[in-house]
Amino acid sequence: MRTSYVGRLAPSPTGLLHLGHAATFWTADFRARGHNGTLLLRNEDLDPQRSKQEFVDAMLEDLAWLGIEWTPPMIVQSQRLALYREAFEKLLATGHAYPCTCSRRELAQMMQAPHEDTDDEPVYTGKCRPTSNAPRTLQSGMNYRFRVPDGEAIRFIDGNMGAQQLTTGKDFGDFLVWRKDGLPSYQLACVVDDAAMRITEVVRGADLLKSTARQILLQRALSLPAVAYFHTRLLVDEHGTRLAKRHGALAIHTLRQRGLKHDDVLAMLQA
Ligand code: GLU
């Protein structure tokens, strides 16, 4: 009998899945099965420049090859913009978001999940932060940031990594929630979808720990239910460098083409 456990796989179709994804997705699959739960798939295709259909196709083939069974239909973020906008307007009405006119460079980064050792957004300087948190209305053509509380320790118990603590203003600052081209940031879309999909546990890489803390704040501001977290440790190569999408040779697609079997990949991860 199915239980109420609901997990999800949330790849961004901006490149080929690599070994790190295989490790995280197998963990997600394992945990969903262990709980007799359901595993959903969400296509995080909100980056219009980098998302490509060919990567969606490759991701579906790779998941099948990895033996990961998810429950259809696939949720597609680009088809859910009204939902994100509604949540964003709630943040505006409750004084949690403010317009920001700085930092174009950060803009490019906000559409994807920030990955710690490469492009996690820098702590915001607070340049556009207003003195009061008065309610606001949406003006088009503006970027908006979420106002984090000052110096608050965000704590949670991770199912894999134990007690975690990240402090606002130190580990991360006011972060982008809405882009001037009318799209939500990864953080906002993720929180809205995890709640709408009734996810009970998020399994993701440890590079997203700071994002988890941001998302806990968003859940609180939007009165959404809390979720359990299980962060998987990052895979590193023999030089201690994190394996990431750019290591083309470690793309699942490439390993598959080289004739490896899914058990060979599992053995590589366990080595
Ligand atoms: N789409 C994100 C990524 O590629 C993952 C997001 C998540 O697990 O919340 O890293």
Image (spheres, rainbow, N blue to C red):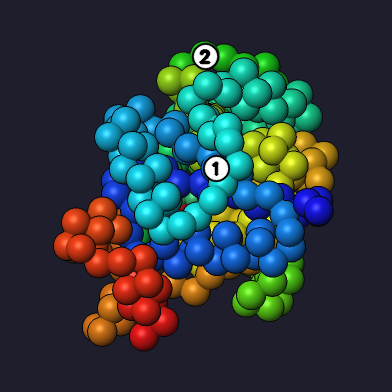
Res. 63 mark: none
Quadrant for residue 187, please give it: top right
Name the residue type under label 1: Leu
Disc on the earlier residue, 1 or 2: 1
Tell me whether circle 1 and circle 2 mark residues in contact (CB < 8 Å).
Answer: no
Tag 1 residue: 41
SS for dot 1:
strand
Name the residue type under label 2: Ser
Residue 247, above or below 128: below
**In this image, 159 relative to 116: left or right?**
right
Tag 2 residue: 140
Crowd band around label 2 with a 10 angstrom C-alpha radius: few (<14), some (14–19), many (20+) = few
Which of discs 1 and 2 lies nearer the camera? The answer is 1
Residue 242 at x, y = what percent?
33, 71
**In this image, 238 relative to 4: left or right?**
left
Q: Nearer the viewer, residue 71 or 11?
A: 71
At x 35%, y 45%, the residue is 61
Image quadrant occupied by the C terminus: bottom left
Q: Nearer the viewer, residue 56 or 235?
A: 56
Cα separation, mark 1 vs mark 2, equals 31 Å
Residue 239, above or below 201: below
